[in-house]
């Protein structure tokens, strides 16, 4: 029986071999060709604002162009229907709907019926779908959110990297998420939370350098988006940022701005945005649950779920439900899938690694491994690495987690990958540009495999 080799692995071997042979037997021509390509790329990347607009429109136009091959997605997961309910509710000018008198006949997953008929999820993705519904169909909002994510990622990377490397990182994000990824082809979300994370990570270094109100407002906007899309994962990202902010406010950085300037230009507008965000969240909770401090998500968990959220949580006694589907899901699958054993911890952790690896990485990323230790050790990237470690620990502490749960750190992941490419490209073996060959192969492999 022949051994089956995955297509991605076969492509990895073939492309890597081809580029390595070029680097070994024609190193000068190989370097000259790449240098010419990079020269034109660098000229384009230097036009920062233009590139941000390009990164917004490019994934939108490409996805529209491939509609004959990838039609408008049809929702199929119960989470999606909950989000679509929220988007339709917002599009009709309401935050929630009245309880139907025959609600028991329409009971569905991830939806509250009391005191209002509404989705359990935070309102961010619902606003995206409502925007799309205004434009013709909810999926348009998804497409626009992907464009915003790519543009925001480039803006964020421009604060951490030279222009051409920032452009490269944003292109990698567009390739990975902008065509065939389920972020683009479902209603689950991911792009909006990634946009929020990029705004926070791009605004904070600009605040530290320039002390501008504009950057403070964008920092507050990013935090507001995180709080209303992925509040738990957003909090994990925000903790190190808050530490950096306090350190900067205390005058421990190289910023020359006086304390009074910092308070007026940064703290005041940022506090204003955060207060408005908290006021909106409280009002939203009040309208949906009747309690300013009770979110729809917590209400739904209390009503339907007997399993905990974290690996160390133990299940509560089973509940009796009104339909067989709920019995199968809550008293069946959930309780059988995780039973608080070390074997279950290993199983769900392996699932997270596999799923996240397929979404955020690609086969060619294996070629970047020699550059990863150097990227991690860069002093400038110490904070992003801490954010990634803390966020990863938080995600792995959950019992169930899908890749889009970690969306707030998308820009961090690609920042570290690009920095690994920067280190890898200068590595030589016997004076041959092997590192450059591996870097080029990794990028080409993503460009040819956008799933």
Image (tube, rainbow, N blue to C red):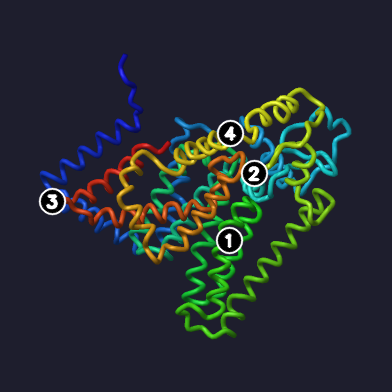
Tell me where residue 410 appears, x and y as whole percent.
49, 51
Distance in Å between CA atoms under marks 1 and 3 = 45 Å
Question: Residue 204 at what x, y percent from top left?
Answer: 52, 68
Q: Which quadrant of the structure image shows residue 161?
A: bottom left
Camera-nearest label, 4 or 3: 4
Which residue lies at the image location 62% right of the left edge and 70% below the top edge? 270
Q: CA distance from mark 1 to mark 4?
A: 30 Å
Q: Give the residue number, with chain letter if any, for mark 3.
A: 430
Please determine whether, in this image, residue 19 is positioned above or below residue 267. above
Closer to the camera: disc 1 or disc 3? 3
Foreground disc of the pair 2, 1: 2
Q: Which residue is mark 2?
A: 310
Q: Earlier in the sequence, mark 2 or mark 4?
A: 2
Q: Which residue is mark 4?
A: 344
Q: Going from the N terminus, do you reach mark 1 or mark 4 first?
A: 1
Q: What's the distance in space between the residues labelled 2 and 3, CA to CA?
A: 50 Å
Q: Residue at the spot x=67%, y=41% of the render?
A: 83
The mark found on residue 238 in the picture is 1
Kindly report which numbered mark, 2 or 4, lies closer to the viewer in this rendering.
Answer: 4
Please report contact status of discs 1 and 3: CB closer than 8 Å, yes or no.
no
Spatial CA span between label 4 and label 3: 48 Å
Select label 1 or label 4 by which is in front: 4
The C terminus, quarter of image: top left
Q: Percent position (x, y) of residue 149?
A: 51, 52
């Amino acid at each position: 029986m022949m051994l089956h080799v995955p297509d991605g692995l076969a492509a990895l071997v073939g492309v890597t071999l081809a580029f390595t042979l070029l680097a070994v037997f024609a190193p000068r021509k190989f370097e000259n060709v790449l240098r010419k390509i990079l020269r034109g790329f660098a000229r384009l990347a230097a036009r920062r604002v233009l590139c941000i607009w390009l990164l917004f429109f490019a994934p939108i136009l490409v996805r529209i162009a491939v509609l004959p091959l990838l039609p408008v997605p049809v929702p199929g997961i119960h989470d999606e229907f909950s989000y679509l309910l929220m988007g339709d509710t917002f599009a009709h000018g309401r935050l929630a709907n009245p309880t139907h008198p025959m609600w028991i006949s329409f009971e569905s997953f991830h939806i509250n019926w009391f005191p209002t008929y509404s989705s359990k999820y935070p309102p961010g993705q619902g606003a995206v779908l409502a925007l799309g519904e205004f434009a013709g169909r909810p999926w348009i909002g998804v497409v626009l959110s992907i464009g915003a994510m790519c543009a925001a990622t480039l803006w964020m990377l421009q604060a951490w990297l030279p222009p051409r490397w920032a452009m490269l990182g944003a292109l990698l994000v567009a390739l990975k998420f902008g065509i065939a990824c389920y972020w683009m082809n479902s209603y689950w979300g991911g792009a909006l939370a990634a946009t929020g994370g990029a705004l926070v990570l791009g605004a904070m270094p600009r605040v530290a350098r320039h002390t501008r109100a504009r950057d403070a407002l964008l920092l507050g906007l990013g935090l507001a988006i995180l709080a209303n899309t992925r509040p738990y994962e957003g909090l994990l990202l925000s903790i190190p940022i808050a530490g950096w902010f306090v350190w900067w406010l205390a005058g421990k950085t190289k910023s020359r701005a006086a304390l009074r300037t910092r308070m007026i230009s940064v703290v005041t507008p940022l506090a204003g945005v955060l207060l408005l965000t908290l006021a909106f969240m409280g009002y939203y909770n009040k309208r949906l649950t009747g309690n300013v401090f009770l979110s729809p998500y917590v209400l739904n968990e209390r009503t339907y779920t007997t399993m905990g959220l974290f690996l160390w949580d133990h299940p509560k006694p089973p509940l009796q439900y009104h339909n067989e589907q709920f019995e199968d899901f809550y008293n069946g699958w959930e309780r059988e899938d995780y039973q608080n054993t070390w074997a279950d911890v290993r199983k769900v952790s392996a699932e997270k690694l596999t799923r996240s690896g397929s979404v955020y990485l690609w086969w060619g990323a294996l070629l970047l491994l020699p550059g990863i230790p150097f990227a991690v050790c860069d002093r400038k990237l110490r904070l992003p690495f801490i954010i990634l470690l803390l966020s990863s620990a938080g995600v792995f502490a959950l019992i169930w987690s899908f890749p889009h749960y970690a969306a707030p750190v998308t820009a961090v992941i690609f920042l570290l990958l690009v920095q690994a490419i920067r280190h890898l490209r200068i590595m030589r073996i016997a004076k041959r540009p092997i590192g450059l060959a591996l870097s080029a192969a990794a990028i080409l492999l993503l460009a040819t495999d956008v799933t």
